[in-house]
Image (tube, rainbow, N blue to C red):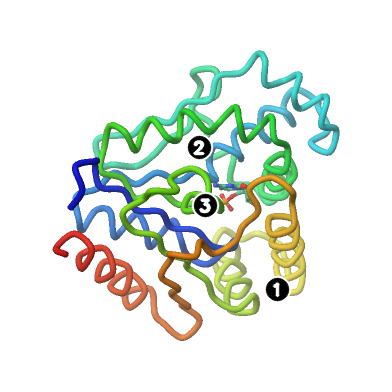
Amino acid sequence: MTDRIFSVAIDGPAGAGKSTIARRAAKELGFIYMDTGAFYRTVAYAALSRGADPGDQAAVEQCLASMTVTPQWDADGVQHMLLDGLDVSTAIRSPQVSQSASVVASYAAVRDFLLDSQRRVAQSYAVIMDGRDIGTVVLPNADVKIYLTASAEVRAKRRWLELQQKQAPDTYEQVLSEMIERDRRDMNREVAPLRQAEDAVLIDSSDLSLEQSIQAVVQVISEAISS
Ligand code: DC
């Protein structure tokens, strides 16, 4: 153990199961779980609801000046996102917001706007943080870094099944092509692109069940805590 508060960075592409796995691992280990994608989603949602085109960088940057984005945790440890004090946690989950979040996340001004508040959480709590640039940029000194991935087809199938349960009309092909598009954007942007940190442990969940993936993550963290 270091004298800093223990921190875990989990990065990986869309639909790899990061949030479900990280939330369950955090509960098991008594850590706070923080989903950083929700921050980018909140900025995208703010831009859309103010009539700004997410593709218009100047318009999005202008919105930043007048918005506050704050994470909050309820008694069950569930993270909520507040935009200007209002809870937007449900609204930020739409497919439109997913694509727009990936677009606004490519702007340096948006990333700078969110960076400090994400780092502050790790200074105050033992945290498992997930996103795209946690091990590379947000917490480069994290005690444990995990890169969680799965094949695009497996990730799209899982996401499509989730959408089916919500009676969403999207076809598997649509979900797959949107996922590939989002990965391409997240991996190829100039600022803080998604990549595996050199010191990250790779976990490929393509052939693992959810429970097996959770246990693989818990094991990596537990070994680091006790070493
Ligand atoms: O994890 P998610 O699908 O909720 O993330 C939404 C988008 O936000 C994703 O396409 C890329 C961006 N993102 C990012 O650039 N950096 C992070 N640390 C987390 C998410």
Q: Earlier in the sequence, mark 2 or mark 3?
A: 2
- Residue picked out by circle 1: 172
Tag 1: Cα neighbours inside 10 Å, few (<14), some, or many (≥20)?
some
- Residue 160: where, in percent of width, then height? 62, 69
Q: Earlier in the sequence, mark 3 or mark 1?
A: 3
Residue at 49% of width from left, 18% of height from top?
85
Spatial CA distance of label 2 from label 3 is 26 Å
Q: Which mark is residue 136?
A: 3
Spatial CA distance of label 3 from label 1 is 32 Å
Task: Say which of 192 and 126 sits in front.
Answer: 192
Q: Secondary structure at mark 2?
A: loop
* Amino acid carrying mark 2 in the image: Ser
Mark 2, mark 3: which one is toward the viewer?
A: 3
Q: Secondary structure at mark 1?
A: helix
Tag 2: Cα neighbours inside 10 Å, few (<14), some, or many (≥20)?
some
* Amino acid carrying mark 1 in the image: Tyr
